[in-house]
Image (cartoon, helix red, strand yellow):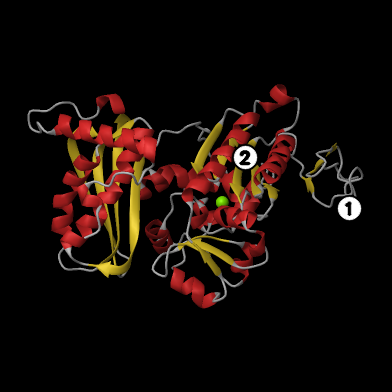
Amino acid sequence: MTEATPALCRDCLTLFEDTPAERCPECASPRLFAHGELPTLSLAHLDCDAFFASIEKRDNPELADKPVIVGGGRRGVVAACCYVARIYGVRSAMPMFKALERCPDAVVIRPDMDRYRAAGRRVRELMQDITPLVEPLSIDEAFLDLSGIETLHGGRPARSLARLVLDIERELGVTASIGLSYNKFLAKIASDLDKPRGFAAIGRAEALDFLAEKPVGIISGVGKAMQASLSRDGITRISHLRRYEEIDLIARYGAMGRRLYSFARGVDKRQVEPNAPTKSISAETTFDTDVADADELLSRLWPLCETVAARLKKSGLAGHGVTLKLKTRDFQTLTRSQRLQDPTRLADRLYRAAEPLLRKAADGRRFRLIGIGAHDLVDAALADPPSLLDPDIGRHAKVEAAMDRVRGKLGADAIVKGRGFKT
Ligand SMILES: [Mg+2]
């Protein structure tokens, strides 16, 4: 006699103690989710499917069956691509020229972040309706801890999640995929297994086997360099990691060794942290043609400083550190950081901190991208105190505050400070 496997109909949300033979007996839907640990798994990763592209399709039904790529001009990269475009081999983060080689008929759409952000905010609200423990990872994905949900809603986590994605579909017209497990590491992997409109779980009983043959790169934090050094030691798959004691992995790979040891065994103790503090606020732009001239680079930098300052002000934060980012034409990334005397939320101070870094970095090389970020974020109350070293600071703050007020009334483009004009 085989054990019963509980199941859930993802359309009518009926729970079954044992999995129906084919379709849901209640509503005839084929979308049954069956899993032995369905009643106990409560850590989820929700990821919207091709989010930007889905919003574009939602708002323009003529695009429904067409390959759609959202991204910058020919020099940019693919920010999102729909599943039709993926059939042609287009992937997100792929350079646009390459994407268009693979799919010349693609409809390319410039990103409209305001629209995406509005939809992302609503997705977040819907998630927060089912649990307060929502940790956003980006505009369209988050971890959800539903371990307390049984008492809260009298329903199983899986059921609440299935209802959530139906709500997102109905209200926002975009689809999402769910990964369900018992920790963050595995939930994030699971949400990718059944995309789009997926619902997949990795349970305790299967985690070790599931992971064994996976490449070590599946562990978050294991990038290219780490993979290379692991590979030199003969470790390419998760099962290889299990040959070593924790103490050996720590000795060899430092703090990362601890994660390698536990993740390889399906153990991840990280909690879901709602509203995890923002680590940095940044803005960047990719040029249509490469730029080498320092003054030209500086003129591109100024609007980015304004963007970062606006975001700092909006979130009530100030940056104690400033990082300048440049990408060379052959895709090498340079970053140069500077710690400030005092935390700032002013575009002008960000700019003045970055200027000498940029003048030094601009040694004749041609760059394809420039960016600036504020990090070491602190509460805005600590920002820009009057300073003897910088007596102008109060005036800068007043001018920027006045500009913000006008922008608030008239829109962001109402005032462009001197440096923002194209020369
Ligand atoms: Mg997504």
Q: Which residue of the protein is positioned furthest toward the top in this rendering?
A: 151
Can residue 267 be seen at all in this image of the molecule? no
Q: Mark 1 points at which residue?
A: 22
Q: Is mark 2 on a helix, strand or loop?
A: strand
293 to 35, vertically: above or below: below
Q: Measured from the top left, where is residue 96 in percent x and y?
A: 45, 69
Q: How far apart are marks 2 and 1 (CA)?
A: 26 Å
Q: Considering the image in quadrants, where does the C terminus appear?
A: bottom left
Q: Which residue does the image show at 74% across and 32% down from the upper left? A: 156
240 to 364, vertically: above or below: above
Q: Which of 151 and 163 is in front in this view?
A: 163
Q: Is mark 1 on a helix, strand or loop?
A: loop
The disc at residue 44 is 2
The disc at residue 384 is none
The number of numbered badges drawn on the structure is 2
Q: In this view, does 290 lie to the left or right of 235?
A: left
